[in-house]
Amino acid sequence: MAQIISAVQRKGGVGKSTTLICLAAKFAKDGAKVLIIDTDMQQTCVKWEAKKECGVDVTPHTDDETLLELINFTTISYDVILIDTAGYQSAMAVYAMSASDLVLVPTPASEPDAEGAVKTIRHIKNVTANNVKQPVIRAIFTDVDKNTTITEAVLSQLNASGVEAVSTPIWHRTGFKEVHSTGGLPTGSALSALHQFLGAMQVDGLLTYYDNIFKEAS
Ligand SMILES: Nc1ncnc2c1ncn2[C@@H]1O[C@H](COP(=O)(O)OP(=O)(O)OP(=O)(O)O)[C@@H](O)[C@H]1O
Ligand SMILES: [Mg+2]
C-alpha cells in the first residue's frame, strides 16, 4: 500500500508542484516506486516528467469523481503516491486531502502566505474531521531566503495558531526553478537543500517508505 501525500494551499505559487516533483524524484532515486497524480489543469508535474525520464510515473487526472478509484486501483503498485492540487476548496482538493496520509501545506516565509497556510490547515481539519482516518498535516517552509529573519516571525505566527511545521525549510535555490526546464532532480545546492529538508521529514517520522527501509535493515 502506498503512502498518499498531497500538497494543498489556498494561495497559489507557494511551491506545491516544485516540492512534490523534487520529493518524487528523490524517492525514485532511493528505489521507491512513485506515482504523481497531477490534478492541476496547468499540468506542471506532467510537463516536468516529459522533460526527462527519472523513474517517476506521472498521470494527469482532472476528474474529481474518479480520483479515489484511481488511488484504490494504483496503491498496490506504488510505495508513494503524490497528489498535486490546484486551489483548496474544489471537490478535487477535498477528495485529495481525504485520501491522504500526509498533507503538506507549503508556505514561503511571508505573513500572507503563512496566513494562507493557517486557513488551509483549519479547512483540512474541518473537511477530514469525520473521516475514519485523519491525515497528518504539516506546514512546510518553501523558497526561504537564508538571509532573512522573517522565518522566525512566521514560525511564531504558525505556532500561535497551533500549526505544526517541518523544522527545516526548503531554502531558496535557483536549482529548484531549473527542474521545470530540465526535468529530474535538482542539482548542486538545491539538491543539498532538498536532502536537508528530507532529513527533517525522516526525523519527524513522516515518510513511510524510509521508515520501512530502516525497519527491514534493522
Ligand atoms: N525552494 C525554491 N527555490 C527557488 N524557487 C522556488 C522554490 N520553490 C518554488 N520555487 C519557484 O516558485 C515558483 C512557484 O512554485 P510552484 O509552481 O511549485 O508553486 P505552486 O504552488 O505549485 O503554484 P500553482 O498554485 O501555480 O500551482 C516556481 O517558479 C518555482 O520554481
Ligand atoms: Mg502547481
Image (tube, rainbow, N blue to C red):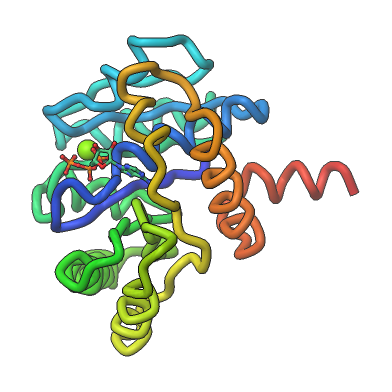
Looking at the image, residue 138 lies above or below residue 81? below
Q: Position of residue 121 (x, y in %)?
A: 26, 69
Q: Is residue 205 left or right of residue 190?
A: right
Numbered disc total: 0
| Residue found at the very far front of the displayed protein | 147
Which of the two residues, 90 or 65, is positioned nearer the viewer here?
Answer: 90
Q: Nearer the viewer, residue 60 or 15?
A: 15
Q: Could you say which quadrant of the image residue 44 lies in?
A: top left
Q: Quadrant of ligand 1?
A: top left
> Which residue is pictured at 14% across the width and 58% down the height?
10
Task: From the top left corner, tell me how far across and down residue 143 is, in percent.
Answer: 34, 51
Quarter of the N terminus within the rendering:
top right
* Picture layout, residue 18 above or below residue 145: above
Q: Residue furthest bottom?
A: 160
Left/right of residue 123 with respect to residue 215 in the rendered view: left
56 sits to left or right of 181: right
Q: Residue, x 32% and y 28% (percent of image)?
A: 70
Residue 145 percent coordinates (x, y): 37, 58
Res 133 visible: no
Q: Nearer the viewer, residue 171 or 69?
A: 171
Indicate the quadrant where residue 175 lies. Answer: top left
Residue at the (68%, 45%) spot, across then down:
210
Residue 127, given in percent of the width and then of the height, sits at 21, 65
In the picture shown, does residue 25 fall above or below 129? above
Of residues 188 and 157, the one drawn nearer to the viewer in this rendering: 188
- Vertically, is 54 above or below 159? above
User: Which residue does the image show at 40% across and 18% down from the upper left?
Assistant: 183
- Can the viewer see residue 56 in this picture? yes
